[in-house]
Amino acid sequence: SDGLTAGLQRCGANPAKSTHLYSLLSFLAVLSRELAHGDQGSLLVAATPKGQDKSWKNNLGTRLPEPTVCQRQADGSFDCGLSDFMAGGTQKQALTDIAGGVVGGGAQLCDLAASQDESLVQFYSEVLAFSFFTNGANKDDSATGMLPVPWVLLGARRYMNHLSGNSMGGSCGAIPAGNWLNEAISSRTVPVSVGGTQQKVAPSAFVGVASVCSACNVGDSCSHEELINNKCDLQRRHLEQDLSNWYQAFEPSMYEPSVQQAFRSVVSRIGTGPWGAGVWYGDSQQSFLTVWLATSLLSGITLDYYIYPSFCENQGNQCFVLGTSGGCGACVEQGALPGAGVDPGSCGPRGITDIISQFKGRSAQELYDALLQVGQPPDQIFDLLHGSHGI
């Protein structure tokens, strides 16, 4: 069986799940306009990186550049002036899909869900279509016939409305009853070289990358409430694996040589929310510091970090990166689900602006060493790192 057959069988088994049909029809509708005069359109480049190694450790001498921090405002805009990374629109920004083992997760490419990875694929129709080309689908294993991660699609675009990282009625994104096509879809391209030939690719990308699953490994050592309040020590003890995962997915040199120039031409910045601290319940402060550190080890790529009061996974937990100095308590009150257990009393004094001021311009090695040695809860990580290594 192939990915197309497997997908039709999965989704067809439940007629109520029709989101994938909206996605594919939207894809065809947009292309019918763009290719109406016989144009070939822009190229898509799909690739999987080589296996992990520890080459990122060679770059720990680099300095930590200041990341762009984008906090969601009440009207849905971001104070950094950029578009929501989930919706796309920022030139040369790679969208981070907070994936599990495959793109699309438990929704199996059929529907929207209360998690980012399961919903994103519906709005980025080219990603959904690529899953049709997988092989070896096994009816007894729902993950087969789906795209394994890490995986990148250079040139991916959003075909449907409406999508935001902030929860929409308990879902990640919502398809309106009418006018669901993304009429603002970009037609911009950049010239790239692929295998020695000149091509044109949209200046955007979809990157599926998994973090370590804290909740999967915690056993009986921590409660769910401790996980969602960054109070579990295990959440702080998988730094090296997460650094390796991020570097493998985003470092151009990890890909086949024929597509490396295309990767560098299309991706110059990474957009992400609380990667590592979604429904796998990592520590949101650890997560931010990990992606900041890992991105600093890449060649020619910067970080755009987005903060939501109610990210569609683990709602309210990302507020802890704000600290009381940045309004953490009010953010939790606004964004956490009632009765979920995210406690504004768990907010520590120091926030993201404090930790950036402490470490920006320092060597990546200093932050790496500090995180390896960070203390245990109940104190939040930003507070424990205050004054570390003489900083």
Image (spheres, rainbow, N blue to C red):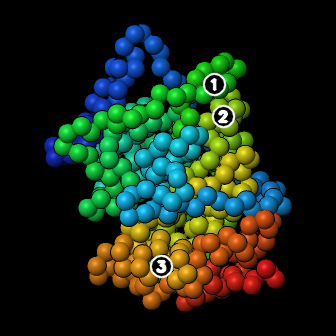
Upstream in the sequence, badge 1 or badge 2?
Answer: 1
Crowdedness near tag 3: few (<14), some (14–19) or many (≥20) residues, C-alpha within 10 Å? many
Q: Residues within 10 Å of mark 1 (few under 14, many from 20)?
A: some
Disc 1 to disc 3, C-alpha distance: 43 Å
Front in this rendered view, residue 207 or 343: 343
Q: Where does the image place residue 335, in percent across and percent down from the top left?
A: 36, 72
The answer to whether residue 180 is above or below residue 302 is above
Instruction: Say which amino acid is labelled 3.
Output: Cys
Percent position (x, y) of residue 168?
30, 59
Residue 257 picture location, percent across and down: 71, 32
Indicate which disc, 2 or 3, sits on the residue closer to the N terminus: 2
Which residue sits at x=46%, y=32%? 186
Q: Which mark is residue 180?
A: none
N-terminal-most mark, 1 or 3: 1
Question: Mark 2 belongs to which amino acid?
Answer: Ser
In-image side of 34 versus 252 (left or right)? left
Q: Is residue 346 above or below residue 290?
A: below
> Height in image: 41 above or below 170?
above
Q: Does the rendering let one see residue 92? A: yes
The residue closer to the viewer here, 267 or 45, is 267
The quarter of the picture where the N terminus appears is top left
Tell me the residue that label 2 is attached to: 265
Q: Are marks 1 and 3 in contact (CB under 8 Å)?
A: no
How many circles with numbers are drawn on the protein?
A: 3
Q: Which residue is mark 3?
A: 328
Question: What secondary structure is marked by label 1?
Answer: strand
Say which residue label 1 marks. Answer: 191
Query: At 26% across and 61% down in the image, what residue appears?
Result: 169
Looking at the rendered structure, the kind of residue marked 1 is Pro
